[in-house]
Image: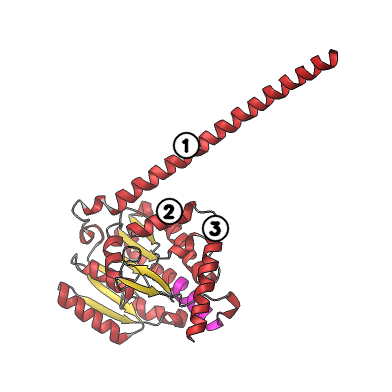
Amino acid sequence: MAAVDSFQLLYRQIARTCNTYIDALAIVGAWYVTRKSICLVCDFYSLVRLHFIPRLVSRRDLLKHYGKWALVTGGADGIGKAYAEELASQGIDLILISHDRSKLEATATAITEMFNVETIIIEADFTRGREIYQPIREALKDKEIGILVNSMDVPFEQPQFFLNVSEDKLWDLINVNIAATNMMVHIVLPGMVQRKKGAIVNISSGSCCKPTPQMTAYSSTKTYLDHFSRALHCEYASKGIFVQSLLPFYITTNTATHSDGLLVYSWLAPSANVYARHAISTLGISTRTPGYWMHSIQFLFAQYMPEWLWVSGATLMNNRLRRQTAHKS
């Protein structure tokens, strides 16, 4: 009987201890679910605030807030050109920088005729490194730049393992995707600080949200731009400078196109013009945004997705794209 009583006593003690642990785990679980629910609600509110509410009210007067001149690097085509057109539609004069003079002249002429603004072009090849910046500095000496848009980019052409990327391509990635943004900010920012107003938009990429195999060098440069932008805003927000990191995913030009071997539709991957129209409405509101409502939803999914799942999906997709590229060649 003594043994039975001892066993029952031990059982009751273990049961009480287990109940205590279960209660503790329940509290932790409830806290976790509550926290995630609050985060989702906040993310949903942010999505509505960024991409839908601004379309219901009059758009922000960028000319009044930031000044007469905007400088757009990579402004001869793609997102840079589309963003420049959106700025010009608000009466802002433009300075466009690119390495292709014929495209620059054509873009500048078209924008001047369409929006009746002044446009200045500067031909510069950012892959050449440090030597190009003194002429740019001289050309901008008397201009009060209110908005700087850094959209120059060495594009991601196809998935590659890191050792298959040439040394020349690696230096181009460093000089264009990283160094050029730093130097352009270093040239323009002092005037903004002196006037106590200005906006800097650095175009990164949605690929920076998690490690992306076979895009190692490219996505890493975009991650740098994202962190650089966020840190720069922390340093200079108190001086009246707004710094934004844009994180776009796929951008296309057709209603449905095979982009890098993948079928991508316009509601998922907008044209550069549609993207720029959405992105510019977030300027002055969000310091870090994909810029387009569907891209924001993609970015939310990517943030909540486990890293191993993102890496697995990216590996499968990039393996497929590499095989398709090899087959075509």
Q: Which residue is depicted at the point 53% across and 78% down?
A: 323
**Magenta region:** 165-179
Q: Is residue 166 magenta?
A: yes
Between 3 and 45, the residue placed more toward the observer is: 3
Q: Name which residue type carries label 2.
A: Leu
Q: Are marks 1 and 2 in contact (CB under 8 Å)?
A: no
Instruction: Tell me, yes or no, if residue 289 can be seen here.
Output: no
Which of pointers 1 and 2 lies earlier in the amino acid sequence? 1
Q: Determine whether the residue tagged by mark 3 lies in a helix, strand or loop.
A: helix
Please state the horizontal and vertical placement of residue 177, each as a whole percent of the image.
45, 72
| Depicted 32 relative to depicted 321: above or below | above
Please state the horizontal and vertical placement of residue 238, each as a whole percent of the image.
37, 51
Please state the horizontal and vertical placement of residue 211, each as a whole percent of the image.
54, 63
Q: Determine whether the residue tagged by mark 1 lies in a helix, strand or loop.
A: helix
Residue marked by disc 3 = 309
Q: Which residue is depicted at the point 29% across and 76% down?
A: 96
Residue marked by disc 1 = 34
Q: Badge 1: few (under 14), some or many (20 or more) residues near its Cα, within 10 Å?
A: few
Residue marked by disc 2 = 300
- Left/right placement of residue 303 relative to residue 292 reads right
Q: Which residue is depicted at the point 39% across and 66% down?
A: 203
